[in-house]
Image: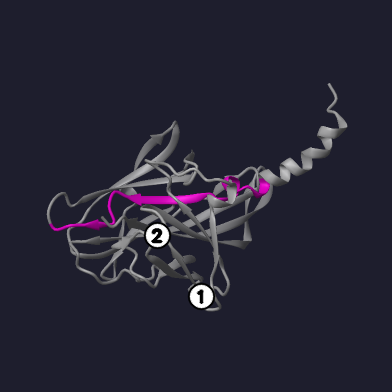
Amino acid sequence: MPIPAKIRRTIPWILLILALSPSVRAHFQMMIPQAAIVPHDGDKSVAFDLLFAHPFDGEVLDMTAPVRLGVLARGQRQDLLKGIRPKSIGGHRTFELTYRFKRPGDHVFFMESAPYLDEGERLFHVFYAKTVVNAFEMEGGWDAEVGLPAEIVPTIRPYGLWTGNLFQGIVKKDGKPVAFAEVEIEYHNQGKKVTEPLAPFSVQVVKADAAGRFSYAMPRAGWWGFVARFDEKRTLEHDGKQLPVRTGAVMWVHAKDMK
């Protein structure tokens, strides 16, 4: 049955809207620990969820095991890749990690995702994600740089933050600040979920200044993801074709309500 001319004329607009929709472009590599601060008393082990998702709308995508996973503490690195376990969320493949803290101080957890093929955009996504967990309330090292190809370096301590506090960081590419980098911000929408009135509310966008520094005040308790994306010159092969690669520097930060 032929498509009526009136409907045919609307199809390009529908495709454009889908291509620009935040839920389509806002892929996030998530690395969410059970807690951002491990106290002196109680369990010293913290579980991490590793998943590829659209955090605000809760859509989880199948994830391949990361290429690299580790922690940086007191200048020493530890490879954690062998400790991950497969997990299923909503029928989609994810991973989890349990880390037992033995020494006090700030621990910078980092990972490099396997390339993810975005069929809609016809490109590969590679993410370099970070989050900081403080052990036993001894500070020092929360701003340590891992040296990832794309990285967000915090300039405000990324834990112990109240709802409404400002988070600030510097976007770096190959170790150098990126002037006027665009940073997307998305809330890990779980529990008592927030419903956005219109699509732009699900993904916040800020621009860094000339020194690569950006700021954002987190308006709700929970985990917030920050990502700066870069179109690379390299390509990866898929079905005999070379497809472009887009990398993302990701940082996860937690805010807590003041009661």
In the image, 79 versus 249, the foreground residue is 249
Q: Residues within 10 Å of mark 1 (few under 14, many from 20)?
A: many
Q: How many marks?
A: 2
Q: Along the horizontal axis of the image, is 135 left or right of 224?
A: left
Q: Quadrant of the N terminus?
A: top right
Can you give x and y, in whole percent of width and height, for residue 181 in the image? Answer: 56, 69
> Is 239 covered by the magenta stretch?
no
Which residue sits at x=44%, y=31%? Answer: 91
User: What is the span of residues highlighted in magenta in the rendered image?
Assistant: 19-40
- Label 1's element? strand
**In the rendered structure, which amino acid carries the disc numbered 2?**
Lys
Q: Which colouring convention does the figure follow? A: one colour
To which quarter of the image does residue 73 belong?
bottom left
Q: Is residue 129 above or below residue 59?
A: below
Q: In this view, which residue lies farthest toward the right?
A: 5
Which residue sits at x=48%, y=46%? Answer: 56
Can you give x and y, in whole percent of width and height, for residue 83 in the image? Answer: 30, 47
- Label 2's element? strand
Instruction: Kindly indicate whether the residue at mark 1 contacts the one at mark 2 (C-beta within 8 angstroms).
Output: no
Residue 73 in view (yes/no): yes
Real-space Cα distance between discs 2 and 1? 17 Å
Q: Residues within 10 Å of mark 2 (few under 14, many from 20)?
A: many
Reading the image, the residue beneath label 2 is: 130
Reading the image, the residue beneath label 1 is: 177
Can you give x and y, in whole percent of width and height, for residue 154 in the image? Answer: 39, 69
Which residue sits at x=83%, y=38%? Answer: 9
Can you give x and y, in whole percent of width and height, for residue 228 in the image? Answer: 53, 62
Q: Quadrant of the C terminus?
A: bottom left
Residue 240 in view (yes/no): no
**In the rendered structure, which amino acid carries the disc numbered 1?**
Pro
